[in-house]
Image: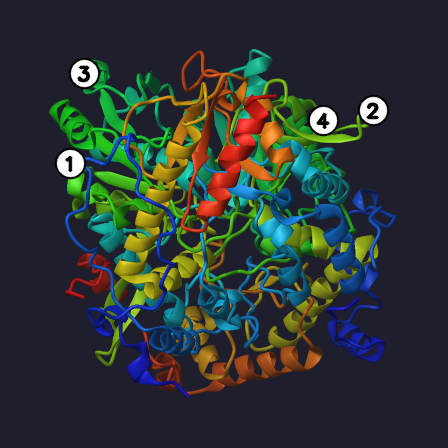
Amino acid sequence: MRNPTATRMLFEMSEPGRGTVVFPESDIPRVTGIPELGAEHLATGLLPLPELAEPDVVRHFVNLSTLNMSVDTHFYPLGSCTMKYNPKRHERLARLPQAAASHPYQQESQIQGLLSVLYELQGMLAEISGLPAVSLHPAAGAQGELTALLTAAAWFRHRGEQRTRVLFPASAHGTNPASAALAGFECVQLSGGRDGFVDLSELRSQLDDRVAVFMVTNPNTLGLFEKDIATIAGMLHEAGGLVYIDGANMNAILGRTRPGDFGGDMMHYNVHKTFTGPHGAGGPGAGPIAVRDFLAPFLPAPVVTFDVARNWYSLTSPEYSIGRMRSFFGNVGILLRGYCYIRTVGGRGLREAADCAVLNANYLLSQVRDFLEVPHGNRCMHEFVASAKRLKEQTGVTAMDIAKRLLDYGFHAPTVYFPLVVEEALMMEPTETESLATLDAFAAALREICSEPAELVKGAPHTTAVCRPDDVTAARKPILCWSGQC
Amino acid sequence: MAYLFDTPEQRQRMLKAIGAGSVDELFEQIPRELQLGRELSLEGGVSELELEQDLQRRLGQAGGGGVCFLGGGVYDHFIPAVVDELTSRGEFYTAYTPYQAEASQGTLQAFYEYQTLISQLSGMDVSNASLYEGGTAVSEAVFMAMRINGRDGRVVVAGSLHPEYRQVLRTYFSRLGTEIVEVPASGGVVSVELCRAALTTDTTALVLQQPNFFGCLEDIAGLTAAAHAAGALAILAFDPLSPGLLKRPGDYGVDIAVAEGQPLGTPLQFGGPLLGIFTCRSEYVRKMPGRLVGRTVDRRGRECFVLNLQAREQHIRRDKATSNICTNQGLLALRTTVFLSVVGPRGLCQMAKLSHEKAQYAAACLTRLPGVVLKYDRSFFREFVLETPLPATEVLTALAARGFNVGPELSRFGDSLGEGLGRCFLVALTEKRTRAEIDALAAALGEVLSG
């Protein structure tokens, strides 16, 4: 039961003079002859941080945590985010002190074991993607996109080509155009066919020697496998361009098909989605990329290489490397979790995960389509997009209203209003780690909500601590910081 | 497989409801010729116990069994037990981005508190809810400066900025035609005059670090004034422990301050995941990258929190977004929130003072050895550059063999820190190091140098 006293702002709980963590007294003598800090650099007073007692801090955060929904507590079908159960074993393994206490500038001789694990992971990700060269460097999927685009740009430059455009379908994640723009490309959005797939004639009309990369999510954000992907890749390659596969939906195709086999030249993984990792209220992720061999010399530095003759692992820079995308090696803590997951389940288990994710999504689709429109067919991969358009026309109840009302039933909401190509979109991704009983209960709740009085649904959620925060005022007059005195 | 539920009977029931004969049929959407048609060649079925034993065996000892005097951006600091205890609560640990405010008030309030704590720590008006790490935070700051002053011709960077941060900047801007001008450091710091000379009318920003990569303290007030006089912004990368003892970025009047947040509650993890701290003056808030949590009220007037100003972000603004960042470092921001809550201003001050005093003591002990000198005769905070008569790589290898992890050597970064630094390396201290460890390091270095 929530204790409202404990969820006051930290700053309101502060009492001057209180403190929790006390460090040992200094055990070293004062020295002379070493330059001292000058008054121009020294702080003049105590920082205005709150002063709290540990029991208060514990109660505060434990009580705050109860205001969240999470995978550990609720079904969380947030489409595109693959909110599957993350096995606890990998959390402990990644926290082994040998990994957690490794400094990135340790001697190479001290990290041979860690490098061997990372090297093995590079090989695993190559096998899963069908793309032979892997960089574990990017910090998250979006950075993987940017990294791959810069890698492609370096390859084009090396060949003496000046290609300036990146194409992507309207159903793309926002990160695709954002990454392309950040990499200095002109963004060209394709509207796509009514069936939700890339429109080949539209794509053809845009292909010329200005096009560097076509970015496509496959399965796409409607949960459909781009059936013409091989043709699309052929068209791009014919025009001298490259195909980037946004790997956000890899969970659907693990062991069934591989981006490298269906024509992709580059892709990123989202380790915390496809494999495992704490979603952590928004991160951290890790966004390794896999590319074709001709792009390998342009990958960012460092990569792990193995010298068989010396039996030695090293961190090296590829010949024409684009350079660094971040400090240090990569998000090793997350990569290790992915590694442990892959070793635990193996090739067969990965495919089984995809099979169950697709089975669960199709089952859920079969249970909702008689009361909620699903504009793009009766079959899907790991997720599908329903639309509340008809309901909205009939009763005024929107996708957002349904999302909020689901919270009252004890379910996290699906992703709403994405992809942009579906009106009143509700994007549902059950993942493989949910039981039939959960899916049935969720479908029943959705059915119930669709027949509830509009007023009730529009007033939802009724059971959460707050209801429909006013984000318009929040944006007009942003309050981003507690402004009182501690 | 271990994490699946459904029995074969249940699967049949589901397939029947779907109207499919088999799971294979569901994959018929994938053209047959594109299907893999074999199992992935990845061994599996390793039990939790076997995997733990295998990793224990392969990874060897923590830190190679050595005492950590390594610096260069991330440090071996103490993390109170309560940080792991609270942040591993499943409700925080396994939630995602707080898009649905009503189902995420715990996360949202914690991030609002994080933003406030970081503002208090840095003396800056506004903090976002995290970026990836220090290096990308610098690049994002430069992009933001361009959006603010509309200048994109040039950015001037101190040669005393972390060399990896400079490399990231070069990669991020490799296609954008912006000239990146590095002002070389001399004597461990950059000169105000040289920076002033490099600042042109199309320079968007001057990028600085305090304490800088060498551990030395720059004249940030003078450098900031030079940037402002040229109409450029001042961007400062700071050590988030330093405000425990030193002036804060806000005290110098810089426009954007960023940091690698690792020292405040994040384990080293071989350099990731880390925490990108990003702050600025309030007038620039709408140009910021990354997520921001704001306070508001709900329908019934109850105070609550939301993701604010989302119109800056990629999921709304797409190619016009202020950054491509989506997944950020939420869990690390939460760790830092808990860390600062329990350490408080006095604890942080103690940590900073202990680190500084131990660094001074270590410098005094080590420079007593013949031929060993401080490379730069300047005040430093918690790390310093040592020069010995032998090549640094040799010295550090020999020290590691004796159980002391020290460095990095400056030559690791090519000549990006200057020439003739082959005998120089960093030594970093934290509150964790003891007098006995420092004395033992000095003895070991003595042995190494006397061959």
Do pointers 4 and 3 mark residues of a single chain? no
Residue A462 relative to residue B38: left or right: left
Q: Nearer the viewer, mark 4 or mark 2?
A: 2
Amino acid at pointer 1: Glu
Percent x, y of residue A401: 40, 74
Please name the residue shown 41% across and 27% down the image. B368
Mark identifier at residue A309: 2
Does residue A219 appear in the picture of this structure? no
Percent x, y of residue B20: 80, 68
Mark identifier at residue B193: 3
Residue at numbered disc 1: A40
Q: Nearer the viewer, mark 1 or mark 2?
A: 1
Mark closest to the chain's N terminus, 1 or 4: 1
Which residue is more in the foreground, A231 or B9? B9
Amino acid at pointer 4: Asp
Quadrant in which the C terminus of chain B appears: top right
Q: Quadrant of residue B23?
A: bottom right
Q: Are marks 2 and 3 in contact (CB under 8 Å)?
A: no
Residue B174 relative to residue A138: left or right: left
Q: From the viewer's perspective, is residue A284 above or below residue B215?
A: below
Residue at numbered disc 4: A293
Q: Are marks 1 and 4 in contact (CB under 8 Å)?
A: no
